[in-house]
């Protein structure tokens, strides 16, 4: 079976979003989302994220895991572009919600209904761009694929302080009495260890003869000085001898 490729964020036209069907029960309503490409074929709205920094472990909530991932890209120039895309996606959902309010919010009190944005605020000042909150699914109909550099892993095996690259699906708009939001469903998550430069140095053993070698070097220098002094004395004696000779000749 041929593998499908996700959309590149740079190629996405949010006007190509379409809403296909609605499912609801007593508690929630889901408005399903698809994407119409250039050939007018309708596909799942799936895109790839830049490589982001993961600093958390996945937390178990009832029957699924959640993972909060900072908007902190491996290549910092990718951050503004990704943030702009997510904000534009939020604005698109809000705009369409106003246009389809009669069908989307039927039988729901909309006076105080709030939209929850994709980027959540972070309590850690280091990650001031905010966080993505993702639900990792493991159901009868769908499983999020999670990999590291070696193998497939389970959600509780996700390591902190790793790089993560993801394929996400704009699955649908979730509506309830508590508010509404766009549900990003993780299709695939790939985690890679952060490479740290190796500064694991060790001291080398000093030579046992190092002090003897230093002493010998000093002795050699001293002997050289003595030699020079002897030469000077010799030269002086020759001069003195010449002077005496000259005196006698006079």
Image: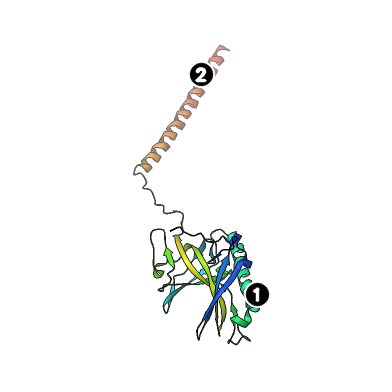
With respect to residue 122, does 114 lie above or below? below
Q: In the figure, is residue 197 to the left or right of 92? A: left
Nearest the eye: 100 or 83: 100
Disc assigned to residue 176: none
From this viewpoint, is residue 161 visible?
no
Q: Which color mode does the image show? A: rainbow
Query: Residue 7: which quarter of the image?
Result: bottom right
Can you say which quadrant of the picture contains the C terminus? top right
Q: Residue at x 48, y 25 (%)?
A: 231
Q: Residue at x 65, y 78 (%)?
A: 98
**Considering the numbered disc 2 on the image, is that residue within a helix, a strand or a loop?**
helix
Query: Neighbour class for label 1 at 10 Å: few (<14), some, many (≥20)?
Result: few
Query: Neighbour class for label 2 at 10 Å: few (<14), some, many (≥20)?
Result: few
From this viewpoint, is residue 12 visible?
yes
With respect to residue 243, does 222 lie above or below? below
Nearest the eye: 13 or 153: 13
With respect to residue 144, does 115 lie above or below? below
Label 1 and label 2: CA atoms lie apart by 115 Å
Report if the CB atoms under discs 1 and 2 are less than 8 Å apart: no
Q: In the figure, is residue 170 to the left or right of 1? A: right
Question: Would you name the residue on which mark 2 appears?
Answer: 241
Q: Residue at x 57, y 66 (%)?
A: 35
Residue 18 lies, in percent from the top left, at: 59, 70
Question: Would you name the residue on which mark 1 appears?
Answer: 95
Query: Residue 103: which quarter of the image?
Result: bottom right
Residue 81 lies, in percent from the top left, at: 61, 62
Residue 99 lies, in percent from the top left, at: 65, 77
């Amino acid at each position: 079976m041929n593998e499908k490729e996700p959309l590149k964020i740079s190629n996405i036209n949010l006007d190509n979003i379409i809403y296909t069907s609605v499912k609801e029960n007593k508690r929630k309503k889901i408005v399903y989302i698809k994407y119409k490409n250039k050939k007018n074929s309708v596909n799942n709205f799936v895109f790839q994220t830049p490589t982001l920094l993961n600093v958390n472990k996945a937390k178990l909530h009832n029957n699924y895991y959640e993972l909060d991932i900072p908007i902190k890209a491996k290549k910092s120039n990718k951050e503004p572009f990704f943030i702009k895309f997510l904000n534009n996606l939020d604005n698109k959902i809000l705009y369409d919600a106003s246009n389809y309010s009669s069908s989307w919010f039927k039988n729901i009190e909309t006076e105080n209904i709030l939209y929850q944005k994709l980027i959540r605020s972070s309590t850690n000042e280091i990650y001031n761009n905010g966080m993505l909150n993702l639900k990792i699914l493991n159901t009868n109909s769908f499983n999020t694929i999670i990999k590291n550099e070696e193998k497939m892993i389970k959600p509780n095996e996700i390591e902190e302080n790793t790089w993560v690259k993801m394929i996400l699906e704009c699955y649908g708009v979730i509506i309830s009495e508590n508010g509404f939001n766009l549900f990003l469903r993780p299709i695939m998550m790939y985690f890679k260890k952060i490479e740290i430069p190796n500064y694991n140095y060790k001291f080398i053993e000093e030579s046992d003869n190092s002090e003897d070698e230093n002493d010998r070097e000093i002795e050699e220098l001293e002997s050289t000085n003595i030699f020079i002094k002897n030469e000077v004395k010799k030269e002086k004696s020759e001069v003195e001898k010449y002077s005496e000779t000259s005196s006698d000749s006079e």
